[in-house]
Amino acid sequence: MHSDRIQTTMKRRRIPIWSEAKATQPREFEIRAIRPNEVHAAASMHFEFLGGPEVARCSFLKLGFKFLEAFYRLNLDNPYFFALGAFMRGELIGLLVFTTDRRKMFKYLLQRHCGNLLFHFLVAFLRRPIPSGRYLIAKLRDDVPPDMRRVPAVLLLMLVRPEARTKSFVGGTGLRIGKALIEATEAVLREKGCRECWMETTVDNGQAYNLARGFGGKCVGEAVRQGVLLRFIVVPVGETLAESPQRTTAA
């Protein structure tokens, strides 16, 4: 199973944390691969935070929640797709999704699940014909930034729930949760031989840009996609994270 391979690479992390109210009672969160029965929770979190019109109009979230959930589920066995969750007492509080090679990820998906993917796309198109059609046409017209062709690894999504980033949440452990997600991701990228990782954010997402700069990221350009101005960032693998992750998006 694909999730087992991820666990072998990152060696499941259990990290103790302490409550401000009860410092003598240690609690812990866990960083691990999303399991099949957790796909709905992961897709729900993804859609909840990034499904709004200001972000979704430049991503395949335009196709709707059902397609997003199917995309996660169909990629569970994909050796180039990784969805890592941060869990506390069984609740998903952080999510990081990335690919070690975007082209190979989609190639594998089409080879293994072409029929299912086409079915879910057609269902999404019938449910949301206008936004789905606009997204598809715009996607075909999108220019691929030159730097992206040489950086196969892509950070697709990173989220830490807002309540987990507050000082009152178990001693303000949002920083540690985000850093743990990044460290687990870097471990996989290093093992797969990736030297850089590609990120895309909206230009008004200063938190994401500062996060990228915090571990060595450099802006390599900007472009408008479907009316949204995006910033393209290349991050070297293995640098030290300096900022607490808030939210990042990829097209």
Image (cartoon, helix red, strand yellow):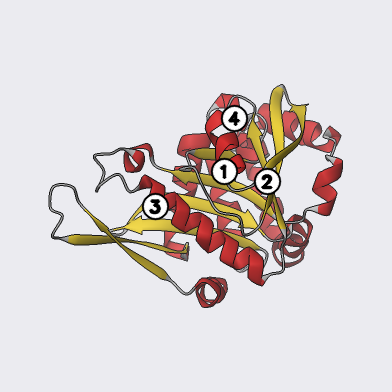
Quarter holding the C terminus?
top right
The residue labelled by disc 4 is 55
| Residue under label 3 | 176
- Which badge, 3 or 2, is on the more N-terminal residue? 2
Label 3 – label 1 distance at C-alpha:
15 Å
* Location of mark 1 (residue): 214
Q: Nearer the viewer, residue 76 or 24?
A: 24
- SS for tag 2? helix
Q: Is residue 233 above or below residue 155?
A: above
Q: Nearer the viewer, mark 4 or mark 1?
A: 1
Given this view, does label 3 or label 1 mark the residue nearer the observer?
1
Q: Number of callouts in the render?
A: 4
Query: Residue 216 versus residue 127: which sits nearer the camera?
Result: 216
The CA distance from mark 2 to mark 1 is 37 Å
**CA–CA distance between discs 2 and 4?**
20 Å
Residue at which label 2 appears = 121
The answer to which quarter of the image holds residue 153 is bottom right
- Secondary structure state at the residue bearing disc 3: helix
Q: Residue furthest top?
A: 227
Which is more N-terminal, label 3 or label 4? 4
Q: Residue at x 83, y 53 (%)?
A: 150
The residue carrying pointer 1 sits among few (fewer than 14), some (14 to 19) or many (20 or more) residues within 10 Å by Cα, namely: some
